[in-house]
């Protein structure tokens, strides 16, 4: 099964590599399991937002709402 990676999964993987961290090291520093990091980097579609935010906080980020069609929502 081929799955296109999301921008979130690519962001985490790229930031982890820039920080010279292994998946194991990132999981320990972020306080999440290794399996969670692997799932996140592989683009799993169903992940706990609180845990995603724990990982993103390591790189100065957090999840947020981004309108897909501003005219639809703000007209």
Image (cartoon, helix red, strand yellow):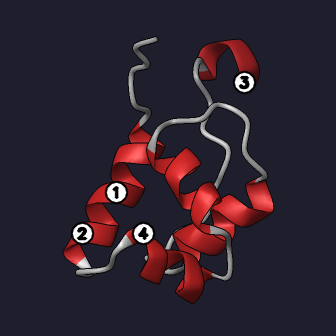
Q: Quick one: label 2 or label 4, which is nearer the N terminus?
A: 2
Q: Identify which residue, 11 or 64, lies in the foreground.
A: 11
Disc nearest the viewer among 2 and 4: 4
In the rendered image, residue 20, in percent from the top left (x then y), is placed at 23, 80
SS class of the residue under badge 2? helix
Q: Quick one: label 1 or label 4, which is nearer the N terminus?
A: 1
Disc nearest the viewer among 1 and 3: 1
In the rendered image, residue 51, in percent from the top left (x then y), is placed at 72, 64
Label 4 environment density (alpha carbons within 10 Å; few <14, some 14–19, many ≥20): some
In the rendered image, residue 26, in percent from the top left (x then y), is placed at 47, 78
Q: Quick one: label 1 or label 3, which is nearer the N terminus?
A: 1
Give the spatial CA distance, label 1 vs label 3.
34 Å
Kindly identify the residue that appears in the image at 27 percent across and 81 percent down. 19
Kindly identify the residue that appears in the image at 43 percent across and 76 percent down. 59
Give the spatial CA distance, label 2 vs label 4.
9 Å
SS class of the residue under badge 3? helix
Disc 1 and disc 2 in contact, CB within 8 angstroms = yes
Give the spatial CA distance, label 1 vs label 4.
9 Å
Disc 3 and disc 4 in contact, CB within 8 angstroms = no
Kindly identify the residue that appears in the image at 57 percent across and 70 percent down. 55
In the rendered image, residue 46, in percent from the top left (x then y), is placed at 73, 35
SS class of the residue under badge 4? helix
Q: Is residue 37 left or right of residue 75?
A: left
According to the image, label 2 marks what residue?
A: 17
According to the image, label 1 marks what residue?
A: 13
According to the image, label 4 marks what residue?
A: 23
Disc nearest the viewer among 3 and 2: 2
Residue 73 to residue 20: above or below: above
Give the spatial CA distance, label 3 vs label 4.
40 Å
Q: Identify which residue, 6 or 40, lies in the foreground.
A: 40
* Residue 74: mark in rendering: 3
């Amino acid at each position: 099964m081929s799955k296109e990676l999301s921008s979130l999964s690519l962001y985490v993987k790229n930031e982890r590599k820039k920080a010279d961290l292994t998946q194991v090291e990132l999981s320990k520093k972020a306080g999440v399991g290794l399996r969670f990091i692997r799932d996140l980097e592989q683009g799993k579609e169903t992940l706990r937002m609180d845990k995603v935010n724990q990982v993103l906080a390591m790189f100065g980020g957090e999840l947020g709402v981004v309108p897909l069609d501003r005219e639809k929502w703000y007209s």
